[in-house]
Image (cartoon, rainbow, N blue to C red):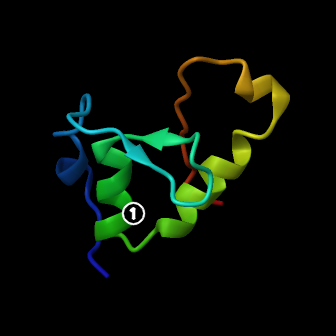
């Protein structure tokens, strides 16, 4: 597994491709999220994000951003 560094992620300020979650087909994610999943072997994180979309308070938002606390 590659260690992710902040400088690896600063290049992602938008997306060229929207990626569809394989199980929750209505959930799309960005190039940056795909990079974290691929490089950090964190596909579980995409699953956590996708499952959060089932919460009605979250579903009504057009755009969602997730901040992960590394201390948890």
Q: Looking at the image, can residue 45 be seen?
A: yes
Decide which of 55, 5 is in the foreground and name it: 55
Residue 71 position in % (x across, y down): 59, 59
Decide which of 42, 20 is in the foreground and name it: 20
Numbered label tally: 1
Crowd tier of the residue under label 1, counting other residues whose Cα lies within 10 Å: few below 14, some 14–19, many 20 or above? some
Residue 69 position in % (x across, y down): 57, 50
Measuring 25% from the left and 39% from the top, which residue is drawn there? Answer: 17
Compared with 25, 64 (above or below) is above
Residue 57: name its quadrant: top right
Determine whether, in the image, residue 41 is placed left or right of residue 24: left
For the N terminus, the image quarter is: bottom left
Residue 38 position in % (x across, y down): 32, 67
For the C terminus, the image quarter is: bottom right
The single residue placed furthest to the bottom in the displayed view is: 1
Compared with 58, 5 (above or below) is below
Measuring 35% from the left and 40% from the top, which residue is drawn there? Answer: 30
Q: Looking at the image, can residue 71 be seen?
A: no
Determine whether, in the image, residue 54 is placed left or right of residue 62: right
Circle 1 SS class: helix
The single residue placed furthest to the front in the displayed view is: 25
The residue where tag 1 is placed is 37
Compared with 12, 34 (above or below) is below
Measuring 56% from the left and 27% from the top, which residue is drawn there? Answer: 64
Measuring 52% from the left and 31% from the top, which residue is drawn there? Answer: 65
Decide which of 1, 5 is in the foreground and name it: 1
């Amino acid at each position: 597994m590659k260690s992710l560094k902040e400088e690896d992620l600063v290049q992602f300020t938008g997306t060229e491709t929207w990626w569809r979650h394989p199980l929750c087909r209505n959930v799309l994610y960005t190039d940056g999220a795909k990079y974290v999943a691929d490089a950090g072997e964190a596909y579980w994180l995409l699953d956590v994000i996708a499952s959060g979309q089932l919460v009605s308070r979250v579903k009504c938002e057009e755009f969602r951003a997730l901040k992960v606390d590394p201390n948890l």
